[in-house]
Amino acid sequence: MVGFGASPLGDEFGPIDGAEGERAVHAAIDLGINYFDVAPYYGRTLAETRLGQALENKRQAIILATKAGRYDGEPGSGFDFSAQRIIASVEESLKRLRTDYIDVFQVHDIEFASQQQIMEETLPAMFKLREQGKVRFIGITGYPLHLLKAVAGSTAVDMVMTYCHYNLLNTTADKVLMPMARERGIGLVNAAPLHMGVLTERGAPPWHPAPEEVLGAGRQAAAWCREQGGNIADLALQFAFSYKQVATTLVGMSKVEHVRRNIQMAEVKPDPELFRGVLKIIKPAADIHWVVGRPENNDPGSAPSPNSVGDKN
Ligand code: NAD
């Protein structure tokens, strides 16, 4: 199932044409995409504002997910997971998104807070919003899998989102998170099937937190696919969309052309030869994960990275 990741609407992968972004949202809805994910952080409110405008008269057709806890600021700052800020945040998002309810309200990047604060302050505030009906479901998002598992496995969250953890470069979500999600009956959302741009012809944006080994493997795989007459993004999406256990796979989009193409890729099986060749190239960099957030929250074996606190998602 293809979900619409709206961080590109906040110019996170480079400036976009706002009107084209709006057309991409409309095309997605017309073609049957019904899950949209955004956050105040994307474009420092720009993505929510653009999405809200594009959703005018179409809000009821979709499941709308946004987040709270991560805002503006220098890398490593700009977080506020306090109950007070969460409550204010939902009101601000409702205004920008031009709606009176949020379907899925998520704590954005829990690894930047203490686990204690998330469990004892942030989530209780969110659960109250769920009781009040301002939001329908509560979730958490972040990068370190063990932390997501610990928090989702011991609280009443409805969903958990992981990114860069189930695609051609990394499949560890299947081992670490999926068994817990299945056991507890909560939805697992798989974000960034293109490894935040690494698995595209254009390549990773400058802020990408992955170590060079991963970025280089992506470039090599893209070049090899091109030589074979294929396309790395197509293959990556075919692979990720074939993982049917997840509630949805969120791909970042801001162009009608990508919306059309990506929906088509959900129906195509990866070409076995191309797939084998890419896996071989990627093997030395497979399942490499990097440092994000507070040191105590990182997964064991996280690789250091100069951009590890600067990612834009
Ligand atoms: P992604 O892996 O989906 O890659 C997005 C990039 O690929 C964009 O530059 C987009 O323009 C490009 N792209 C899309 N389709 C393409 C195609 N067919 N060919 C070539 N390029 C194509 O990364 P993402 O956008 O970071 O992740 C998807 C969504 O998941 C985000 O938009 C966001 O909503 C969510 N997300 C959340 C978190 C979090 O909560 N911490 C982290 C990452 C992602």
Image (cartoon, rainbow, N blue to C red):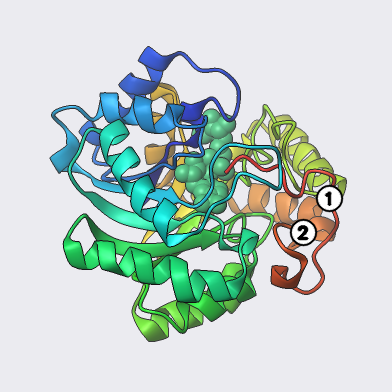
User: Measured from the top left, where is residue 257 in percent x and y?
Assistant: 42, 23
Is residue 29 in view?
yes
Numbered badge on residue 198: none
Residue at x 66%, y 41% (from the top left corner): 199
Q: Tell me whether circle 1 and circle 2 mark residues in contact (CB < 8 Å).
A: yes
The Cα atoms of the two marked residues, 1 and 2, are separated by: 7 Å
Q: Which residue is disc 2 drawn over? A: 291
For badge 1, the amino acid type reads Ser
Camera-nearest residue between 309 and 279: 309
Residue at x 80%, y 59% (from the top left corner): 283
The answer to whether residue 217 is left or right of residue 116 is right
What element does badge 1 sit on?
loop
Is residue 174 in view?
no
User: Measured from the top left, where is residue 290 in percent x and y?
Assistant: 77, 58
The answer to whether residue 49 is left or right of residue 71 is left
Q: Name the quadrant of the C terminus.
A: top right
Closer to the chain start, of discs 1 and 2, is: 2
The answer to whether residue 225 is left or right of residue 96 is right
For badge 2, the amino acid type reads Val
What element does badge 2 sit on?
loop
Q: Quadrant of residue 222?
A: top right
Residue at x 42%, y 50% (from the top left corner): 67
Camera-nearest residue between 262 and 83: 83
Q: Which residue is disc 1 drawn over? A: 305
Residue at x 61%, y 44% (from the top left corner): 78
Residues packed near mark 1 inside 10 Å, few (<14), some (14 to 19) or many (20 plus): some
The answer to whether residue 175 is left or right of residue 300 is left
User: Measured from the top left, where is residue 302 in percent x and y?
Assistant: 80, 65
Is residue 53 placed above or below 103 in the rendered structure? Answer: above
